[in-house]
Image: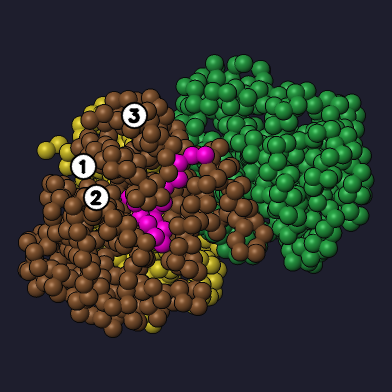
Chain colours: A brown, B green, C yellow
Amino acid sequence: MGIVERLHGKDLLCTQDWSIEEIETVLALAGRMKQDRFAPAFTSLLKHRTFSMLFYSPSLRTRQSFECAATELGGHAQYLEPRMMRLKSGGSAGETIEDAAQVMSRYACGLGIRILEDQIGAYGEGAALIREYARWASVPVISMADDRFHPCQGLADIMGLREHLGDLRGKKLLITWASGALARSWCSVQETLLLASRMGMHITLAYPEGYDLDPEVIAWAEDNCLASAGSLDIIHDPYSGYAGAHVVYSRNWMSPQAYAGGQFQKQREIERSLALPEWICDAERMARTENALFIHPMPVDRGYEVTDEVASGQRSIIYDIAENRLHVQKAVMALTMAELPARPEAFQG
Amino acid sequence: MGIVERLHGKDLLCTQDWSIEEIETVLALAGRMKQDRFAPAFTSLLKHRTFSMLFYSPSLRTRQSFECAATELGGHAQYLEPRMMRLKSGGSAGETIEDAAQVMSRYACGLGIRILEDQIGAYGEGAALIREYARWASVPVISMADDRFHPCQGLADIMGLREHLGDLRGKKLLITWASGALARSWCSVQETLLLASRMGMHITLAYPEGYDLDPEVIAWAEDNCLASAGSLDIIHDPYSGYAGAHVVYSRNWMSPQAYAGGQFQKQREIERSLALPEWICDAERMARTENALFIHPMPVDRGYEVTDEVASGQRSIIYDIAENRLHVQKAVMALTMAELPARPEAFQG
Amino acid sequence: MGIVERLHGKDLLCTQDWSIEEIETVLALAGRMKQDRFAPAFTSLLKHRTFSMLFYSPSLRTRQSFECAATELGGHAQYLEPRMMRLKSGGSAGETIEDAAQVMSRYACGLGIRILEDQIGAYGEGAALIREYARWASVPVISMADDRFHPCQGLADIMGLREHLGDLRGKKLLITWASGALARSWCSVQETLLLASRMGMHITLAYPEGYDLDPEVIAWAEDNCLASAGSLDIIHDPYSGYAGAHVVYSRNWMSPQAYAGGQFQKQREIERSLALPEWICDAERMARTENALFIHPMPVDRGYEVTDEVASGQRSIIYDIAENRLHVQKAVMALTMAELPARPEAFQG
């Protein structure tokens, strides 16, 4: 069975579940789709098909880019909020995920699900909910961001870095925690860490003591580095990681104590984070780099995570990466959901 | 004027308003659409047309299936909530239904309206509101479920039963009240009762004393039985109706006292219902039947209306029927809203 | 550069920003689109393109007509509410308009924005917010109604008047304030005033003392009259303006004191307005006119702004004008957003 056949019907919950060959197939198709966005080879791939998007947590970029992606493939993405649904949750009456997922699979060509920090009571519950949908659905399920992973953001980041840097092997990437008033989930940072470590990058992960990420993800990233000849270093100061970097990714994230007491302690996390204002990406720090690119999954918390000067500067590629969300999502949807061999030429380089 | 011409422009507020020939025309087309879901004969029927859906009450299945239906016919369904509208209600300032329906008729090829128990103050108000829209609209109006009727659910049930049982004449259907924590409207049960009684089925309606349905609907069903050589028996115990049944439909519904005091007494209804836990469909009872199919309009309140063993068992056809919602809705939309004679072949057997 | 080339990429925030030639181009195309609504020359103009609609304020007509317009041009309109977005507002953390508009421009072929009286703290803030989006967006921005302007409503009014009256030069238009319980924005009235004054109409603006409109808009309208050989008279009684009118536009609007104290004083405005019930358009007053047409941007506040007899009477063209919203919006979207020279025939008379 060829790679295209293997991807048909596959879930995308985290890129770590996919082989390098599968990831490269997505990135290659995304590149062709970006070059020739409305080519007829692409615009009928999901013709008359419906992609159902379940937003437990609201979103601007994710909704726009997935809805746009479905439209550009000839289909339609429907926006659903669980508040419109009568789903069972906790002890309340309502429909089970077993039932909901199986019925949706009769209507839709795929499901996208988004559930972030504000909708859960403990780290990991969001990703687990999506896996429960994937267990019962007979169509592909895509994580549109959960508390652990954000596969399409990771793919968009890598696509953007390659557009500007070419081969990423040996390139130095600084992923740094930043102060901020939004108490962000770990998903974007963890996904990019996993992907960059598979691409052979030299990664420095910088954060204040007490802001460790998921130890399982760190262990996977270390394994990835062994296989890819990359490296991963963890440091705890807001300056030294900039030296020699080719890419800087500055982003706030919550602490592992965020769910102490069984619910999201948003206000406490924000206060704790705002007490560390020296963790910001600014022009002075960027001057220590190898003319590094600035990346961020957006929305940017300007003035906290990064200064306006850097975020709007010439080396910022945040809009290019945001645009790439569209292209990688189109490629993932086409490869996992389009009928085979509907349009073989669409999948060829 | 042929049957296809007669259906063009017709409202579907309750199947009782339609002739048997009209109903059979819908079911036949739905069957062809299920067999060849994306056939070109179907995918342009509502090309570039807009179907406007007004959800006074939220919904998962209904929204998904109608939105999907419009997309698969080449058109688009727009999701509208009255909270987005500035409609006159009670004494408040706002737009009249006269104005809203006439303007929507300039934009849309049809209107779907859903209004259930939580949005009304007395039984019948929901159905009456939809009739008011239909009075003023110059395009077809479809009830997407109201407090009295749910025509598309009834059609999907009959379609599913025929797929599994063939000719329904003489087959025994048990419709039984069940305990539950959702205090459901009468619409689904009443619609299926009306249709099954026109198909010549032998129907047993089982419910506890005090849970009578709409007497007008019961009278229609009795008349239907006379014409179809079917029968309708009403009993008040939770066991005996299972004997010899070919189909079991177990479903909670509210009592006729649900609106005492001029508003929906949801909590009181739920408490009253939960006090009757012996009204559940379980494997022991199903063993008394003629290997009966289990049906339900979903969402299923598992553990109250039916056990997991039955709902997920081999004779449960709940997902098939849920899927049929899509096909019958496509057929209804095509027959009532598509231009004539845009695609005559689409309507032929 | 021809007129079609000049319109490509242009924002429509107020018709006053557009030349008469540009406005006539829109109206001519809208007329052809109305005559042959689903002609192939039109239905591919925005094929697979996404139009993003940001509704800060909810709406029935505007959402329906824009969503319909995109569908009829072959594309898709996405409905976004800022509550789904994490936008910076006031001192709160969130995304800047600079970032949001630039990212949206990567996905969408155009942006529509609606923001009315209930979402702002001072007159002009809504229009200013839309101009901020337009500053950063690289795709056309359309005002879908703000506190100052409503260009598509104005165009629909003029289109409707021409359909019924032909050449508007020298025709007498009464725009009269009316009592009402909705405390309306000035946008619709001001936009029609601006357009009618460019068309050479003789306009009487009637309102109670204390209900002055925006002085800048009045000054523009006076200038427009000089150029068009029209005229503008302001009076303060609810009767005399009807004499000899060919068109009556009766509509409530808020007073210039509506935002005293830095927030919208809705209740006070409504009370003040309801104290002036003699400001209503009724059959007796209409009898003084030259068999005048009745127009209104809808929703109509029947019984306050106008009697049922007039609103539903033979000279009321409110539904025709509501329908024209669709056609002018399709024309504006086609001319500003469709690729050039994708379908030159679509733009020709």
Q: Is residue C291 above or below residue B28?
A: below
The residue positioned 49% from the left and 66% from the top of the image is A120
Label disc, if present, on residue C41 of the rendered structure: none
Please state the chain letter of the residue tagged with numbered disc 2 in the rendered image: A
Name the chief secondary structure element in magenta.
loop
The residue positioned 62% from the left and 27% from the top of the image is B30
Of B13 and C230, the residue lying toward us: B13
Of C157 and B316, the residue lying toward us: B316
Could you tell me how far apart the alpha carbons at marks 2 and 3 are, in whole angstroms?
24 Å
The residue positioned 14% from the left and 74% from the top of the image is A239
How crowded is the residue under tag 2: few (<14 C-alpha within 10 Å), some, or many (20+)?
some
Please state the chain letter of the residue tagged with numbered disc 3 in the rendered image: A
- For the N terminus of chain A, the image quarter is top left
Query: Which of the two marks, 2 or 1, is nearer to us in this view?
Result: 2
**Residue C172 placed where, x, y %?**
37, 51
Q: Secondary structure at mark 3?
A: loop
Q: Quadrant of residue B335?
A: top right
Q: Left of C123 or right of it: where is B311? A: right
Q: Is residue B268 above or below residue C70?
A: below
**Residue holding disc 3:** A2
Q: Secondary structure at mark 1?
A: loop
Query: Which of the two marks, 1 or 3, is nearer to us in this view?
Result: 3
**Residue B46 placed where, x, y %?**
49, 30
**Residue holding disc 2:** A227
